[in-house]
Amino acid sequence: MPDPGHGVSLEEQIDQWLSYLRRRQAMHSVDVAELEDHLREQVAVLVDAGLATDEAFLVAVKRMGGLDALSREFAREHSDRLWKQLVVSPSDTGEPKAAARTDAIVAFCLAVAAALAIKVPALFGMLAEAADRGLQRVGRYHQAIHVLGEMDKTIAVDISAARAELGYEPRVSLYDGMRESIRWCRAQGISL
């Protein structure tokens, strides 16, 4: 089995290891530099203990753990900045900054649009409800504003509980009650 470090200098081995680390999005350049320092210290200790540099490198890398484990640990420790690396800054794979910035802007715009799609009906409902209250205070009624003010509310009524618990039975049907209400509004001069 060929030796992976055979014919390759320690610096080349470290550079190759660092290039693998830099591809991990959880790793920041400061973290990579810190890990490089740890690796170099471990290699120096092992060389002083009598190992060849290529052996010392392999043992030191093994002691530090696999790249997946290192990436997971750094992601756990530095989760506060991981989202910034994933969303705001371009990856270390050479993606242009403009493309990363465009992606971030698109993601932000989609988030704002989703929030507006959810909140706009409720906002209009609140504004219309306030306008309806204001109009009612001065003795006015505007059906469209009143209905818009109820847009974010459930106004359907179920009388089954009143029937079951109180024995309630309406004397007027819903249809007839609506007709009487409209007739009353017109008699009061309220246009519908």
Image: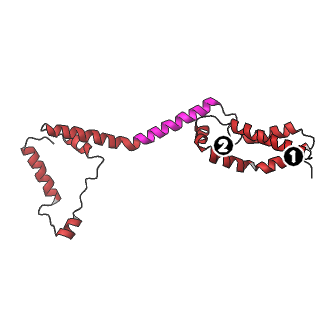
Q: Is residue 27 visible?
A: yes
Mark on residue 110? none
Question: Farthest residue toward the top?
Answer: 98
Q: Earlier in the sequence, mark 2 or mark 1?
A: 2
Q: Residue at x 63, y 46 (%)?
A: 77
Query: For this rendering, which residue is in front, 29 or 119?
Result: 29
Q: Which residues are magenta?
A: 89-116
Query: For this rendering, which residue is in front, 149 or 83?
Result: 83
Number of labelled discs? 2
Question: Would residue 184 be found to the left or right of residue 48 on screen?
Answer: left
Task: Quickly name the residue at label 2.
Answer: 26
Task: Quickly name the residue at label 1.
Answer: 46
- What amino acid type is highlighted by mark number 2? Ala
| Magenta-span inclusion, residue 108 | yes
Q: Position of residue 184 (x, y in %)?
A: 8, 48
Q: Residues within 10 Å of mark 1 (few under 14, many from 20)?
A: some
Label 2 – label 1 distance at C-alpha: 28 Å
Q: Position of residue 159 (x, y in %)?
A: 21, 63
